[in-house]
Amino acid sequence: MHNEIIVILGKKGSGKTVMARHMVSDKRRLIVYDPMRQFSSCGVVLVRFEDLVAYISHNRRGHFRAVYQPEIPIDATNDIVRAEFIRMCDLVNRLVNVYFLVDEIDNCLPPRDRENGFFKNMIQRGRHAQVSLVATTIRYTDTQRNLTAQADTIICFHTHEPSDVKYFRNYFGVMADDLHQLPPYHYVKYDKGQVSRHEPIRL
Ligand SMILES: Nc1ncnc2c1ncn2[C@@H]1O[C@H](COP(=O)(O)OP(=O)(O)OP(=O)(O)O)[C@@H](O)[C@H]1O
Ligand SMILES: [Mg+2]
């Protein structure tokens, strides 16, 4: 499937970023939004938006693996953080056949923010334009509903957030009660209606 939404969830240090890298390792048209600089090994690292646009434009009919690491100051306001992400979504909205990876999406798109429009557009357009999203988040219930409600695949590592466990009973049934007992890097996967438990991926 080339218009899938994959959400990776778990507490701090549970293995989300490693799993996200693994999920996109074979993607030939990939953009990673990486303000935390966790994906340098995944492609061509670009720190200026202009350079990212130039790199994508140059390769838009072929293969590209772009890792965008914007230089956002530590004391940047939420508006600056949000504007950078909107700019990123806007670029993705103009592409077809692409995987878009966003680590810690709750930082760029908090649930109580007004939906930024671009993101909604990306999800709606995804079906026609073959845009896929891979997103990680620490707290599922802190993530925008229009993302979580449309996830095709949910990968869940150890979590003990009561609100998340409650939410996941809908997806995982009784397995939701295992989530706070999962050993390190073990995970539960919901994949188009099927729920399964997995050993850690091999590094
Ligand atoms: N399958 C695995 N097998 C062995 N070690 C792993 C595995 N997955 C992750 N790790 C190790 O666990 C550590 C944390 O992993 P990772 O950074 O992916 O977690 P995270 O959930 O993204 O954490 P954070 O919330 O802090 O971003 C890393 O040092 C990584 O090497
Ligand atoms: Mg991480």
Image (cartoon, rainbow, N blue to C red):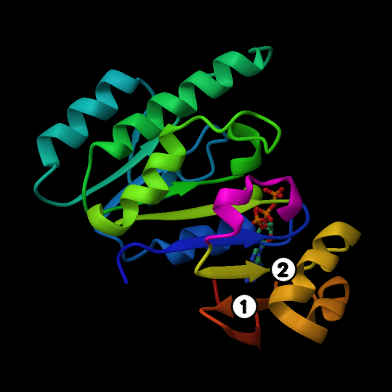
Spot occupied by residue 173 in the image (x, y as percentages of width and height): 77, 83
87 with respect to 195 (left or right):
left
> Which circle's residue, 2 or 1, is located before the other in the chain?
2
Asked if labels 1 and 2 touch by Cβ distance under 8 angstroms, the answer is no
Can you tell me whether the CB of the residue at mark 2 lies under 8 Å from the nearest atom of ligand 1?
yes
Residue 153 lies in the magenta-colored region: no
Residue 143 lies in the magenta-colored region: yes
What residue does disc 1 label? 189
What residue does disc 2 label? 157
157 with respect to 124 (left or right):
right
Considering only vertical position in the picture, is 43 above or below 15? Answer: above
Quadrant into which the C terminus falls: bottom right
Spot occupied by residue 25 in the image (x, y as percentages of width and height): 38, 63
Is residue 203 something that shows in the picture? Answer: yes
Spot occupied by residue 47 in the image (x, y as percentages of width and height): 39, 24
CA gap, disc 2 to disc 1?
A: 9 Å
Considering only vertical position in the picture, is 40 above or below 179? Answer: above
In the foreground, 55 or 120: 120
Q: Quadrant of residue 193?
A: bottom right
In the foreground, 31 or 193: 193
The magenta-colored residue range is 140-150
Which residue appears at 64% of the width and 87% of the height?
196
What amino acid type is highlighted by mark number 1?
A: Lys
Considering only vertical position in the picture, is 115 above or below 103? Answer: above
26 with respect to 39 (left or right):
left
Please, what is the dominant secondary structure of the magenta stretch? helix
Spot occupied by residue 161 in the image (x, y as percentages of width and height): 87, 58
Which residue appears at 22% of the width and 42% of the height?
95
